[in-house]
Image (spheres, grey):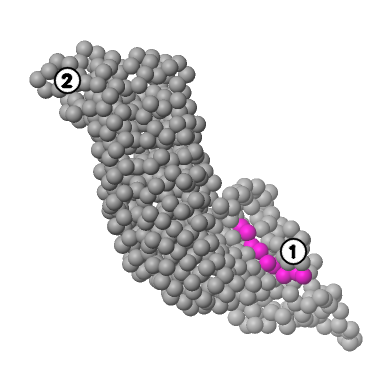
């Protein structure tokens, strides 16, 4: 805004930007901005497990020295084989681990794990080899991932049963056999060993938020019971979709976000017919999303943001009627949103930020009755915004920096955040956006459009309102006064660069005097027009003045 000589009460000139944005907690992986209204997704969806493993062990397990090969004890008299005796146990170990012994290399996790088995006297092969083999495999995993440095390694490499909640993060099925490894947020480092694929009952692997590196052993995908794998937030690399993955026909949840995986999404993705969650945000995946993905009719969540994807949104995405979450932001996908997206009646979260999407929003989006968040800023959309008045669950609508035109519908009763700045929207700002959401609406950004008519009269009664930006429009009339008790949460009000008349009411100045550390920005057209001495809005308490229109 232009400035001239200061008025009698000299407001401080500032840039037309807020000092802080509210944080709105939701149960979703997207968050409201706390620094600027531009949202860029940075975290994995929040339904990720959040339990942190913080208990530190009193000491690290110790492994006693042992030979790498064993021989039964000799006697001058023939002995009867006894699996519980030292000689019987040694004989069994030599037989069970003959291939391991033949290939052992010094100072490797495999040698350390074998030494552990040799000295793990509480367990033998009397009931078969499975216990020893599983304990060996888990010991290899321990040494391969820096077990001594884990945040918590309770029970590991001790004499207790690994299946009876004895080893932290390990659970076994009702018929025995390790079926879950859950060691998320536990400071694992190093690599995932290929031996893990020997745990034939394994169905659930959760190792997210650690420091693992290297590749994911493709042999894992041969585990016939595997349905859940979450390796997000590590430093893993390699091909995200190796050919072996199509052996994992039972997999339902595949979470690989925030790593360094590369490659493309193969059309054969449609073979994973039970897939419900496909997450690989913030990797290096290229190419287009194959149309065949729409054949995955059990799919509930696709989280692809932050990759180098190209092409268009799959044209038959409307066939994926179980979808409740789509996030393809910050990719190079182009084109328009298919009109059949209106078929996704279970859709709650739709995020398409900072892309190159064009065309009009499908009017069928009015059918998305369960929609809670629609984030599509920084695109090239045109045309009108669909009527969202019948979307009762809508909480966040962020469409700034597009080329939308025409009016905006009323929204409510759960709206918390609306940002339609920097478009060509016109008509009046619906008062119902404020009256219908008088205890939920926190941030309302309408700047730099061509809205006309009065300031919505209900805005002072929104007890939750933190930011109100109305600047850069064609609003007329006077600025409504407020009463004591109004706007208890307010921090910023921007009225400038409009056609408003009359002074800024005393009630607003009284409020900014009462809570100066909270109410930090008040902008109005309090500088005179060129050639006059009287501003559009006389203001004794504004922090910034414009000239108006």
Label 1 Cα crowd, 10 Å radius (few <14 / some 14-19 / many 20+): many
Which of the two discs, 2 and 1, labels the residue nearer the N terminus?
1
Disc ID at residue 163? 1
Magenta-colored stretch includes residue 309: no
> How far apart in space, not on screen, are marks 2 and 1 (Cα)?
79 Å
Location of residue 267 by image quarter: bottom left
Q: Is residue 422 visible?
A: no
Label 2 Cα crowd, 10 Å radius (few <14 / some 14-19 / many 20+): many
The quadrant of the image that shows the N terminus is top left
Q: Is residue 265 visible?
A: yes
Residue in the foreground of this view, choosing between 501 and 121: 501
Magenta-colored stretch includes residue 181: yes
Residue for point 43% across, 17% down: 483
**SS for dot 2:** loop
Q: Is residue 7 left or right of residue 495?
A: left
Location of residue 155 by image quarter: bottom right
User: From which residue to which does the magenta span run?
Assistant: 175-183
Residue for point 72% across, 65% down: 172
Which residue is most to the top? Answer: 8
Q: Is residue 380 left or right of residue 71?
A: left
> Residue 12 at what x, y percent from top left?
26, 22
Disc ID at residue 33? none
Residue in the foreground of this view, choosing between 53 and 276: 276
> Residue 533 at what x, y percent from top left?
14, 15
Q: Is residue 160 above or below residue 525?
A: below
**SS for dot 1:** helix
Disc ID at residue 528? 2
> Residue 68 at what x, y percent from top left?
67, 76
Q: Is residue 144 above or below residue 477?
A: below
């Amino acid at each position: 805004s232009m400035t001239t000589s200061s008025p009698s009460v000299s407001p401080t000139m500032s840039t037309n930007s807020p000092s802080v944005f509210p944080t709105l907690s939701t149960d979703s992986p997207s968050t409201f901005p706390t620094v600027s209204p531009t949202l860029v997704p940075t975290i994995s969806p929040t339904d990720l497990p959040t339990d942190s493993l913080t208990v530190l062990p009193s000491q690290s397990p110790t492994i006693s020295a042992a030979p790498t090969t064993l021989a039964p004890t000799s006697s001058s008299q023939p002995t009867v084989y006894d699996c519980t005796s030292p000689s019987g146990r040694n004989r069994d170990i030599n037989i069970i681990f003959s291939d391991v012994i033949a290939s052992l290399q010094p100072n490797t996790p495999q040698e350390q794990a074998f030494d552990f088995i040799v000295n793990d006297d509480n367990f033998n092969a009397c009931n078969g080899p499975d216990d020893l083999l599983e304990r060996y495999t888990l010991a290899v995993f321990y040494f391969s991932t820096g077990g001594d440095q884990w945040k918590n390694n309770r029970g590991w490499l001790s004499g207790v049963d690994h299946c009876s909640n004895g080893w932290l993060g390990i659970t076994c099925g009702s018929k025995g056999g390790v079926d879950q490894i859950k060691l998320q947020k536990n400071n694992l480092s190093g690599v995932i060993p290929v031996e893990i694929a020997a745990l034939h009952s394994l169905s659930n692997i959760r190792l997210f938020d650690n420091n693992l590196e290297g590749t994911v052993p493709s042999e894992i995908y041969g585990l016939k019971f595997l349905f859940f794998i979450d390796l997000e937030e590590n430093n893993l690399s390699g091909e995200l979709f190796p050919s072996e993955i199509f052996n994992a026909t039972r997999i339902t949840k595949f979470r690989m976000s925030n790593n360094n995986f590369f490659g493309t999404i193969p059309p054969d993705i449609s073979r994973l017919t039970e897939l419900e969650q496909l997450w690989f945000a913030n990797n290096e995946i290229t190419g287009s999303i194959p149309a065949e993905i729409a054949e995955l009719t059990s799919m509930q969540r696709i989280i692809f943001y932050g990759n180098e994807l190209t092409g268009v949104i799959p044209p038959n995405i409307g066939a994926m009627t179980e979808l409740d979450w789509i996030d393809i932001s910050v990719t190079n996908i182009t084109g328009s949103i298919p009109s059949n997206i209106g078929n996704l009646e279970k859709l709650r979260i739709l995020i398409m930020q900072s892309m190159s999407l064009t065309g009009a929003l499908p009017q069928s989006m009015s059918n998305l009755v369960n929609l809670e968040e629609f984030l599509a800023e920084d695109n090239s959309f045109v045309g009108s915004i669909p009527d969202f008045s019948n979307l009762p669950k809508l909480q966040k609508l962020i469409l700034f920096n597009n080329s939308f035109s025409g009016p905006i519908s009323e929204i409510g009763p759960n709206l918390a955040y609306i940002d339609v700045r920097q478009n060509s929207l016109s008509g009046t700002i619906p008062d119902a956006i404020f009256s219908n959401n008088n205890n939920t609406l926190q941030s309302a950004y309408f700047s730099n459009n061509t809205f006309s008519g009065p300031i919505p009269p209900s805005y002072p009664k929104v007890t939750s309102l933190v930011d109100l930006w109305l600047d850069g429009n064609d609003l007329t009339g006077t600025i409504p006064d407020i009463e004591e008790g109004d706007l208890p949460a307010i921090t910023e009000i921007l009225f400038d660069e409009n056609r408003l008349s009359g002074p800024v009411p005393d009630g607003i100045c009284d409020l900014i005097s009462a809570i100066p550390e909270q109410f930090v920005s008040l902008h109005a057209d309090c500088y005179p027009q060129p050639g006059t001495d009287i501003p559009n809005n006389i203001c004794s308490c504004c922090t910034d003045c414009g000239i108006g229109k």
